[in-house]
Image (cartoon, rainbow, N blue to C red):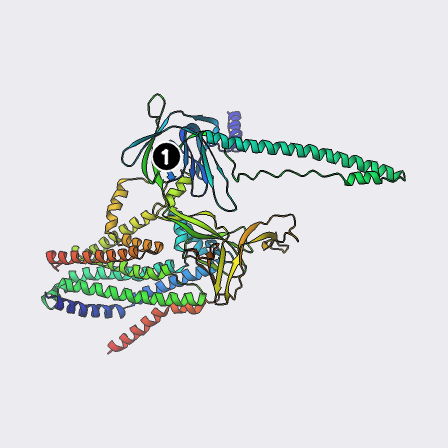
Amino acid sequence: MKKAAVLILLLSGFSMTFGDVPVRKENLIYALLAFNGRDYSPAFATEEADTIYLIAGVDNFLGVRKAMVYYWPLTDEWRTDTAVLNVPFEGTLELIGPRGKTQAFSPVRYTYFNVRGEYELNWKVAQGAEADIAWKRWTDIMDAYNAAVRRYQTMSLQYQTEVDTLTARIQRIRNAGGNPELLVDRMSSLVKPEAPSAPNDFIVPPAPVQEAFILNLPAGDYNLRFRAPEGRILEGSEKKLVVHEKRRAQGIGYEIIPGDKWTRPLESTTPSSVLYVNGSSDLFLQPFYQDEYNDLRIAKTVRNDAKGNPNLMKWVRIQQIPRAKIELASPDFPTVRILEEPFVVEQTSSSTLGYRIVPYAPQGAHKGRQPDLMAFHVPLRPEIQRIRFMTLDNNGTPLAESGRQIRVVSTSGISSALLLLALAPIVVMAIVLARRARRYTP
Amino acid sequence: MRVNARMHAARVIAQRQILETLISPGFYITLAVGLFLGYTMVNGFVRAVDSSGFNYALNPLYATIGRLVEGAFGKTFLDKLFAEGPFLFAFLVSFTPVFIFLSVSSVFRFGLEKNAGVIELLAYGPADGTAYFLASFTKDLLLTLLTILVLLAYLGITAGVSNLPLGPAFLLSLLITFFLSLAVYAYGILVSTLTGNASSALALFVGILLFFVLILLGSFAIVGGYVRTLSSVVAWIVKWLSPFFYGGLCFQGVELKNPFTFAAGLVLLSALTGVVLCASHLALSIRGVRA
């Protein structure tokens, strides 16, 4: 009996050393690759999810498969475990539109890629044979690049071996008191092979060609179901599909990076918002285009089990504004236009171990280094009370809804005098009551 | 009763009621509490600003408010609430004590005087029940206007010394709050005319107000999906009776910079006030002024 008790005690202690493994369950999921306004988000909808959310007027990819799913409490989200089970289903996707019209979709071979320029997003979707061509083009580019890398490695090895051999021979001749001039000439005539540059044809290369149902629908509420080849509707595949669209487009938002806290940028997305700072550090601005979506719908487009506010709209960052200018106006200095410049983040050597953002010097201190950020520099000082700014496009035209203001907040103003002023009604009350008492006292 | 005579009676009774309110401490105390809350909100905001902007975590009060609001309504709501600065929130918080005082005291007083036979006595003389509730409404309207002006002046001074702009949403919110308050006062009058005594009028008024507030809060709560439950359908129907729904419409107009939506919200709020006051008049006509 004692032994058993000791064993149970030991085992109970031992069990605490193991992690709490999430319970996985087999689930019919819709694997989604949904466009989120600027990018594609891989997401999935479990069997229990009643609604799928997609953006209208763009290609979205859906697949139906059996996989293991589990809840991950640390991030409060559902995840898939496709390593254990990942079985795609063959069949037809049926979509019942707002007017009751049923539309059937067959799976399509596809790939998607981004051939973005300096800033612009440029997502392309290739289907069928075009997808194979795009994928082959990418694999050919990569094969050529890999072959060039191999050649470079071989040539580098040969070069290094030749340099080592010549160095040893020159040394030997010098030690023997001879003249190694010929060998020195030969060594200086050796050409160091150059490393091949990585392919830049694609910013996001094509994904391996796969099959999915491609939905590009107008906004509205639909019903979705999956029909197996034998004609039956797959259990758990019936879902509501909400296809939503942006309420406003081409708004202007800003990412604001404080000079002393570059790891803590903030965003100004509401057009009438004000940036409050204490003026102890310069600001670095990055203007971007933004579109406005329903808070709940966009959240669930990106992650189907996310939460959101169904009655609020949210600005979603789309892309940086190319070749913009910012105009700064303040009562404290003449109106100026500033341009986007490269900057480098340096760690300060002081005891606070903070960061500072300094201009990028490609020929000086930052030679051989890439800039850390491209931004508009707004110098601030505590004595500058207010700066208004707006973004201008390439032609110098102000962009609508791009105006903001920076206010350097004064903490000294909020004094006890204001607190006393808040109590003024009590003083008035005392006066009124005193006068009344005097008036009615016999 | 002729309209001119009724209006005259309402004006005279309103003058008396305003005077009575201004010579008693309740209004001053709630106004001082409101101003103090406004001071606390602005002071906390200013102290939560550093080189990287406004950060809730830097001030214990705002850290709590931020956590509560974000937890219930989401980050988007929180960001919108403080996008222009602290004044929209500070004003709503500051206005609440006086608003509750005025609306509750009017309902209670109406019920009390009806119970004591004061209104019946007046009805034998130069006034009727409608003139009495119009007087009560006028008193609330004027004192609300006074409160809003005092709060505007105080928050304006606070904004000036701390270099914060009041913001366009704040200034328009004053107008929205004024019209919204009138609709709530009208509900208070309706409740007073329908119930038999002060306590039941007060209980019903507080219940209705809480119901509307809960529907408003529910509409902004973060959810995991659209669930059409019976309660959500009931809420959807009832919201058309709620002044807060039309107030929300006005705020939507402010957000979209759409003067039509904003004006439509104000017109609908005024229409709701008018309809509720007409209903009160009808109720008094049918039930009479006896308790």
Report the amino acid beneath label 1.
Ala
Give me the chain letter of mark 1. A
Q: Is residue A152 above or below residue B243?
A: above
Q: Which residue is mark 1?
A: A49
Q: Is residue A98 left or right of residue A286?
A: left
Q: Nearer the viewer, residue A2 or A436?
A: A436
Q: Quadrant of residue A153?
A: top right
Q: Quadrant of residue A433?
A: bottom left
Residue A24 visible in the current orientation: no
Q: Nearer the viewer, residue A200 or B97?
A: A200
On the rendered image, what quadrant is the C terminus of chain A found in?
bottom left
Residue B12 visible in the current orientation: yes
Q: How many marks?
A: 1
Q: Nearer the viewer, residue A440 or A230?
A: A230
Q: Is residue A105 above or below residue B134?
A: above
Q: Nearer the viewer, residue A423 or A47?
A: A47
| Outermost top residue | A230
| Outermost bottom residue | A442
Residue B287 drawn at (x, y percent): 11, 56
Pointer 1: residues within 10 angstroms few (<14), some, or many (20+)?
A: some
Residue B19 drawn at (x, y percent): 24, 70
Task: Kindly identify the residue that appears in the image at 37 percent across and 33 percent down.
Answer: A48
Residue B85 drawn at (x, y percent): 42, 59
Task: Kindly identify the residue that appears in the image at 26 percent across and 43 percent down.
Answer: B233
Residue A265 drawn at (x, y percent): 51, 52
The secondary element bearing badge 1 is classed as: loop
Q: Is residue A138 above or below residue A268?
A: above
